[in-house]
Image: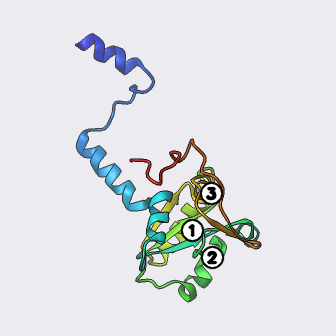
């Protein structure tokens, strides 16, 4: 048994051992307090009634015009300190998004809002994954929808099972 553990520890994945279950539970629980999944946001927005949050697009006007989530509030990160209190109710949580997983704009927007006293989450995947998962979006020309990318959403289902 000891030689197996030694061999596993030499592997790059386990060179730093996994956290204890209690530490892992605390970390992953905290992660869910900070992040929202694109599919969960879409389901909440599609349900009847108030989703309980405001969705905020933190990108530039040019990016917003290329496409955005229907119903989102447009507030570029650079303008949050100046305009958030005019556009957002501090009692309502905010979910931020930007371009996609390669961009930290939604994180910077979430930080700016948190520093102003807002409760905030970041939508993982951003606008890129909103479109890739086949959800409707708006452009200056109207509403559009693309077929879901089979690498991001199961064909013929709205539920990935996770």
Q: Which mark is residue 35?
A: none
Does residue 18 appear in the picture of this structure? yes
Name the residue rendered at 55%, 46% in the picture: 152
> Which numbered mark, 3 or 2, is in the foreground of this view?
3
- In the image, taking residue 17 as reference, residue 94 lies left or right, namely right
> Which numbered mark, 3 or 1, is in the foreground of this view?
3
Give the Cα distance between marks 3 and 2. Answer: 20 Å
Does residue 37 appear in the picture of this structure? no
Q: How many numbered callouts?
A: 3
Give the Cα distance between marks 3 and 1. Answer: 21 Å
Reading the chain from its start, which is encountered first: label 1 or label 2? 2
Image position, residue 149 (x, y; %): 60, 46
Colour scheme in use: rainbow
Q: Which residue is mark 1?
A: 109
Name the residue rendered at 58%, 74% in the picture: 72
Image position, residue 56 (x, y; %): 56, 72
Q: Check the image and report above or below for 82 versus 100.
A: below
Instruction: Report if the CB atoms under discs 1 and 2 are less than 8 Å apart.
Output: yes
Reading the chain from its start, which is encountered first: label 3 or label 1? 1
Q: Secondary structure at mark 2?
A: loop
Name the residue rendered at 77%, 72% in the picture: 141
Instruction: Report if the CB atoms under discs 3 and 2 are less than 8 Å apart.
Output: no
Image position, residue 14 (x, y; %): 38, 26
Give the Cα distance between marks 1 and 2. Answer: 9 Å
Reading the chain from its start, which is encountered first: label 3 or label 2? 2
Q: Residues within 10 Å of mark 3 (few under 14, many from 20)?
A: many
Q: Check the image and report above or below for 44 versus 49.
A: above
Q: Nearer the viewer, residue 145 or 71?
A: 145
Q: Residue furthest top?
A: 3
Q: Which residue is mark 3?
A: 131
Q: Check the image and report above or below for 81 versus 135.
A: below
Q: Which residue is mark 2?
A: 75
């Amino acid at each position: 048994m000891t030689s197996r553990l030694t061999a596993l520890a030499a592997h790059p994945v386990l060179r730093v051992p996994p956290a204890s279950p209690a530490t892992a539970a605390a970390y992953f629980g905290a992660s869910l307090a900070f992040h929202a999944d694109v599919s969960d946001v879409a389901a909440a927005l599609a349900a009847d009634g108030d989703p309980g949050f405001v969705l905020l697009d933190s990108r530039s006007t040019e990016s917003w015009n290329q496409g955005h989530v229907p119903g989102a509030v447009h507030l570029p990160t650079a303008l949050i300190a100046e305009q958030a209190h005019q556009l957002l109710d501090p009692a309502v949580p905010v979910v931020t998004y930007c371009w996609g997983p390669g961009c930290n704009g939604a994180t910077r927007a979430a930080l700016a809002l948190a520093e102003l006293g807002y409760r905030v989450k970041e939508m993982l995947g951003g606008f890129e994954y909103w479109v890739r998962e086949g959800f409707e979006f708006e452009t200056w020309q109207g509403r559009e929808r693309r077929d879901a990318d089979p690498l991001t959403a199961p064909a013929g289902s709205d539920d990935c099972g996770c």
